Amino acid sequence: MMELLPRRAPSGEECSARLLPVIDVRNLQVRFPTRDGVVTALDGLSMQVMPGEIVGLVGESGCGKSTAALSFMRLIPQPGRITAGEIVLDGQDILKLSDREMRALRGPSVAMIFQDALTALDPTMPVGKQIAEPLQLHKGLAAAAARARAIELFGQVGIPDPERRFGQYSHQFSGGMRQRVMIAVALSCGPRLLLADEPTTALDVTVQRQILRLIRQLRDTLNAGVVFITHDVGVVAELCTRVIVMYAGRAVEAGPTQAVFTHPTHPYTAGLLSSTLELTGDRSLPLYAIPGLPPELIDLPAGCAFAPRCPRADPECWNAAPILEPSGPQQSVACWRWKGD
């Protein structure tokens, strides 16, 4: 498989930049007003992604993973808005940028593989042009060079007959093929930060491996940071350097992937890991499921949001929300009971 971009020796400025995070998120809060009340989709999220690092975001649907990624692109749909916090991307607080300045960053600085490729792709434009256009806009390529590069990217993400496919529209592609187009669009400008929201959805196992290899290649060739959003803890264990476990819009556990998955300190993390199917496990036993349902985000309880589902909850858990605090070397947890038995 060809490389996404040629390797090159880093400059002195780039070597210094590697010491700084690609993105530094501080106390991010996102709210959506509704008829029934205000939904707090993110509540005080803080995280960093270093160059060359792949960070996994895991958690049940509705925990805030995709909202976080959309915030990093400054694409929160109306009427939602970012109500507090900072998002520092390559040294710039993007919340202070104009819409025009932010558009200039999307592509070369930050790009996103959206989960739903059908709605993310423009149905009125040939898919090849949707890759060639940002190459012309951000990289200054001539039309012919942008077309050649788009066809090359099609081949790299496993789209057969790329020259013919260049002129086709999204409705002429299967779900899996549309997802590959979406990945090619995100990778086209070689972003410094790649946000991958369930990028292997609708893809078979063989193609999933190819896509994960492409993401690693982007990380290696450009020293890019990657935020990988998924429900598949197996993929996180294989791909991600660090993992952040989210629940009800908050990070409840974070740390090196191996440490978190080997010694989970939050009951929710332990529940997620117990809910996965193991090939070596006893198939006669029912698969474990975390009891209860995630809470409504309109009126969260005063205490820990996971308390109603937690087998270890005590009165303290119901009275005040825990903060993320160190629980080991490079590992943090938001739980009142992590020091307990």
Image: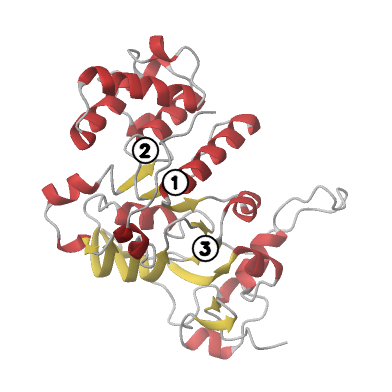
Q: Nearer the viewer, mark 1 or mark 3?
A: 1
Which percent across, then down, holds residue 138? 21, 37
Q: Would you say the residues marked 1 and 2 are in contact, meaning their CB atoms lie under 8 Å apart?
A: yes
* Residue 294 - label: 3
Residue named by callout 1:
196
Which of pointers 1 and 3 lies earlier in the amino acid sequence? 1
* Residue 23 - label: none
Residue ID at (63%, 69%): 260
Q: Which residue lies furthest to the top in this view?
A: 164
Which percent across, then down, holds residue 286? 80, 53
Q: Would you say the residues marked 1 and 3 are in contact, meaning their CB atoms lie under 8 Å apart?
A: no
For this view, does 69 lie left or right of residue 265?
left
Which percent across, then down, holds residue 23? 34, 62
Front residue of this view, candidates 142 and 120: 142
For this view, does 90 lie left or right of residue 8?
left
Front residue of this view, candidates 64 and 11: 11
